[in-house]
Image: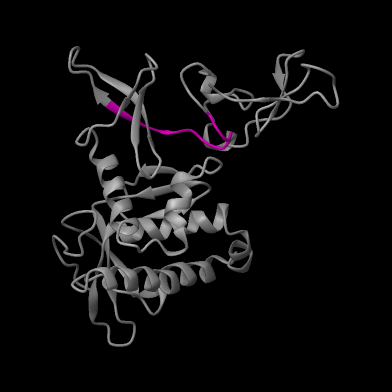
Amino acid sequence: MNGMEKDDEIKGSGNSYDFGARIYDPRLGKWLSVDPMMAKYPDLSPYTFVANSPILLVDKDGRDFITYIKVKNAETGKSELHKVTFDGTNTTMQNVKTGATTGYAPGTSQFVDDLTTSYKYIVDNGADVDNAMKTIATSKDIHVEVEESKKGRAEYSDGTILIDFNSGLEVYDDETDNLKGTQSPALGFWSEVYHAYIDKVDKEAGEKYKNVDKQEEYVHVEKEQQVVKKLQEKDPTNKEPTRNKYSEGQWDVKTKGPTSTEPKETKTKK
């Protein structure tokens, strides 16, 4: 269900329902404000609730929707839309048409598989600095949408992470111009999650590093170094390179997997 709380203090009993993100007036049959994420969904009215599907869909915090994937029905052969939720431990799917919820079966979506693999690579190896990734995944009040990027490089903006789990990043020494190595897509994913963590959780750091360039240096140099140190303490053979400057990350390159530091091919600097 989509939970709400009766707010009877001002308008009397049953005249105002607080859904957290917005107030609903049942006498008017209207929301008293627009959806805070309306700019992301221009095809929907800003006064709708969970895409006009309150029976099938759940919007726990009023801030965002769950990511969708298409899954082929084994009986009909037709693709059906599902929403997928990963809470750091469990992955579930809900059929949008029927409302049926099932456990997610590995192999259903390569993108979802890569997401959970990347999460476990960081968290299970004790490398989730400041518990940023776990906080984002498990919080009931925070939701970050993760979408597949077609451009290669990962990025975070306005509650959404774009990521290509096939694309790592080659790191070059800024002084010698020599290749240090390739960062895995999973490390890149963690870094973008940390941008979300600064945006939604660590407001003090968000204010301190609100300058984009300063935040990039903070996340991709200082924090990434801490993550890699943890990974290499767990596994001394781990070859994740680190940066001394943000600009040392220069080339997107396809890797052999989401947690791999081995490129399928090496870019040639011009």
The image quadrant where one finds the C terminus is bottom left
Magenta stretch contains residue 63: yes
**Where is 4 relative to 178, above or below?**
above
**Where is 56 relative to 247, above or below?**
above
Q: How many marks?
A: 0
Judged from this view, the residue extending furthest toward the left is 264
Left or right: residue 242 versus residue 107 is right
- Residue positioned 26% across, 61% down in the render: 184
- Residue positioned 43% across, 52% down in the render: 134
Left or right: residue 86 versus residue 140 is left
Q: Nearer the viewer, residue 238 or 74?
A: 238
**Where is 139 relative to 198, above or below?**
above
- Residue positioned 18% across, 18% down in the render: 74
Magenta stretch contains residue 77: no
**Where is 196 relative to 180, above or below?**
above
The span shown in magenta is 59-70
| Residue 169 in view (yes/no) | yes
| Residue 153 in view (yes/no) | no
- Residue positioned 52% across, 67% down in the render: 215
Figure quadrant of residue 29: top right
Q: Position of residue 13 (x, y in %)?
A: 81, 17
Q: Position of residue 244 (x, y in %)?
A: 38, 80
Left or right: residue 195 versus residue 121 is right
- According to the image, what is the colour scheme of the structure? one colour
Q: Position of residue 262 (x, y in %)?
A: 16, 64
Q: Nearer the viewer, residue 79 or 130?
A: 130
Figure quadrant of residue 22: top right
Instruction: Give the main secondary structure of the magenta stretch.
Output: loop
Left or right: residue 222 versus residue 102 is right
Q: Position of residue 18 (x, y in %)?
A: 70, 28
